Image (spheres, helix red, strand yellow):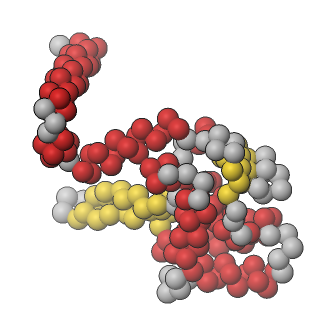
Amino acid sequence: MNTAEGFSTTAERVSQITEQLRVLSEELRRAGRYDLLLEAITVPALQQLNIEAARERLSPLEITSDYRFLLPRYEKEVELSPINKALYIFFLNHEEGVEFKCLSDYREELIALYRKVGNRVSDDIICESIERLVNPLDNSINEKCARIKSAFAKCMDSYQLNYYAISKHSVRQVEGSNRIWYDRRRTITLPRELVQMAL
C-alpha cells in the first residue's frame, strides 16, 4: 500500500468514527442521558472542544503604531501598562515560546521593547523593571502575566482567552535513551495571521 492509499484509508476510517460518534451521541442525547454522554466524552475533552470552537470566534489583534491593543471583532481595546505591552509583544515575537527561567537571556530585547512602548518612562525605571522581570527569584513575571490575562479576560470569554493569554506549553524533550524532561515554555497560541502590528 502506498502513502496515498494509506492516507485515504485513514481518512475514511476517521470519517466512519466521526459518523459513529455523531449517531451514538445523538442517541444518548435523545434518551436524556447527558451524564453518560459527558462520561464518554470526558471533561478535559469537552474543555478542549470548547477551546477549538472558540477559535472560530477569535478577533484579530491590532497593535497600532502608538501601541494601542485593539480587538476589532469585539469592538474593544485591551488596557495594558507599557511594561505589560512590551512583555506581550515580546511573546508575540517568540512564537516558539520562552521559559521564564531563561528570560535573562532576552534582557536587552526586553529593555529595547520597553523603551519603545514606554517612551515617557525613565531609563532607570525601565532597567529596574526588566531586572525584576528576568530575575527568577522575583515574582514580577507571574504578576505581569496575571495582569495581562485579566485585561484580556475583560474583553472575551474564558475559552477565547486561552488563545490570547501567555500560557504554559510543555514540550517533551528526550536526551539519549534514558533521560526525559519537560520544557515549560510560555507562549501565546493566537494564530499569527490574526496579529496585525503597525510598528
Which quadrant holds residue 124?
bottom right
Q: Nearer the viewer, residue 58 or 76?
A: 76
Which quadrant holds residue 46?
top left
Left or right, 120 with respect to 78, comes to right
Residue 140, position as x, y percentages in the image: 57, 80
Q: Where 195 falls versus 20 (above or below)?
A: below
Left or right, 60 with respect to 189, comes to right
Asked if one can make out residue 162 in the rendered structure from this viewpoint, the answer is no
Quarter of the picture holding the N terminus: top left
Q: Nearer the viewer, residue 25 or 172?
A: 25
* Residue occupying the point 48% across, 39% down: 55
Residue 65, position as x, y percentages in the image: 82, 52
Residue 101, position as x, y percentages in the image: 48, 74
Left or right, 28 with respect to 58, comes to left
The residue lying furthest to the right in this view is: 120
Asked if one can make out residue 159 in the rendered structure from this viewpoint, the answer is yes
Q: Where 26 falls versus 6 (above or below)?
A: below
Which quadrant holds residue 68?
bottom right
Query: How many numbered marks, from 0 up?
Result: 0
* Residue occupying the point 42% across, 38% down: 53
* Residue occupying the point 69% across, 65% down: 80
Q: Nearer the viewer, residue 33 or 132?
A: 33
* Residue occupying the point 38% across, 43% down: 50
Residue 159, position as x, y percentages in the image: 44, 50
Q: Where 175 falls versus 141 (above or below)?
A: above
Q: Where 194 falls versus 109 (above or below)?
A: above
